[in-house]
Image (spheres, helix red, strand yellow):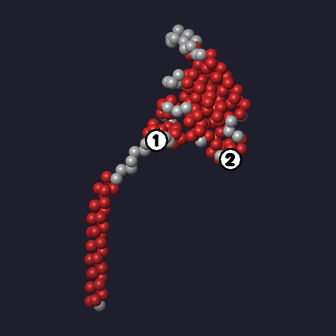
Amino acid sequence: MQGLRDQVQNLEELVRDLNAKLQDGITLAAPIAAKEEVPPKPSPMELLLQGKIAEAMRCALEEKDIDQTVALLGKLSPQQVNTNCSNIIRLCITQQLAADMSFNMPQEGLAQRIQWIKNLVLSLVRIPASEVTADVVLSKNFKIMIQAVLESIQAAKKLIEKAQFDDGEDNPIEIPHSVETDLQLLECVIQSKM
């Protein structure tokens, strides 16, 4: 019986010793874990500088920051965007640009913004129906988002028309005829795709 008590006492001491070592290990590991920081996520511009165009655009879209999107587009050609970005990313860029234009005058200028939207819309309407259908995300969102782009363009036209008239408070904005023509073209092209 004494042998059994001795074994139980030895086991209890062993458990206390293991608990102490475990606590020491946790205490020692805590500062190491606290010092380990996750590296910051690269900014859209950093991604672009690394040549990761699609990732940069996706990141800017996720941040829902029109200034980031505009800054990235300012460093890219339409061909680079069309070649490197997926259909859904291009559709999202188009929607973000058009939505912002429906209530703000673009910082980069109206003609530049409409040029970007026009290039993007023309690339999107050329997507074969089979390709749209094959991409589940694009198929699910294409008509809804292109409808939103159309509505944003129509709202932008009203905003532009209002800005052209002198209401006595502000100077009227002179809009180039080409901008109005491009807006009408965009409306027609989008409506033909719906």
Observer-side mark, 2 or 1, equals: 1
Asked whether the viewer can see residue 66, the reply is no
Left or right, residue 129 beside residue 100 = right
**Residue drawn at 69 percent across, 29 percent down:** 189
Which residue was labeled with disc 2? 134
Mark found first going from the N terminus, 2 or 1: 1
Q: Is residue 2 above or below residue 98?
A: below
Based on the displayed image, in which of its 4 quarters is residue 45 positioned? Answer: top left
Based on the displayed image, in which of its 4 quarters is residue 147 positioned? Answer: top right
State the image coordinates of residue 194 (x, y, percent, origin top left).
71, 34
Secondary structure of residue under mark 2: helix
Observer-nearest of 153 and 55: 55
Crowdedness near tag 2: few (<14), some (14–19) or many (≥20) residues, C-alpha within 10 Å: few
State the image coordinates of residue 88 (x, y, percent, origin top left).
60, 41
**Residue drawn at 64 percent across, 23 percent down:** 183
Q: Is residue 112 above or below residue 45?
A: above
Q: Is residue 177 above or below residue 56?
A: above
The residue lying furthest to the top in this view is 168
Which residue was labeled with disc 1? 50
Asked whether the viewer can see residue 38, the reply is yes
State the image coordinates of residue 5 (x, y, percent, origin top left).
28, 85
Name the kind of residue labelled 2 in the image: Ala
Based on the displayed image, in which of its 4 quarters is residue 81 positioned? Answer: top right
Q: Are marks 2 and 1 in contact (CB under 8 Å)?
A: no
Observer-nearest of 169 and 129: 129
State the image coordinates of residue 186 (x, y, percent, origin top left).
66, 27
**Residue drawn at 60 percent across, 23 percent down:** 156
Q: Which mark is residue 159?
A: none
Secondary structure of residue under mark 1: loop
Name the kind of residue labelled 1 in the image: Gln
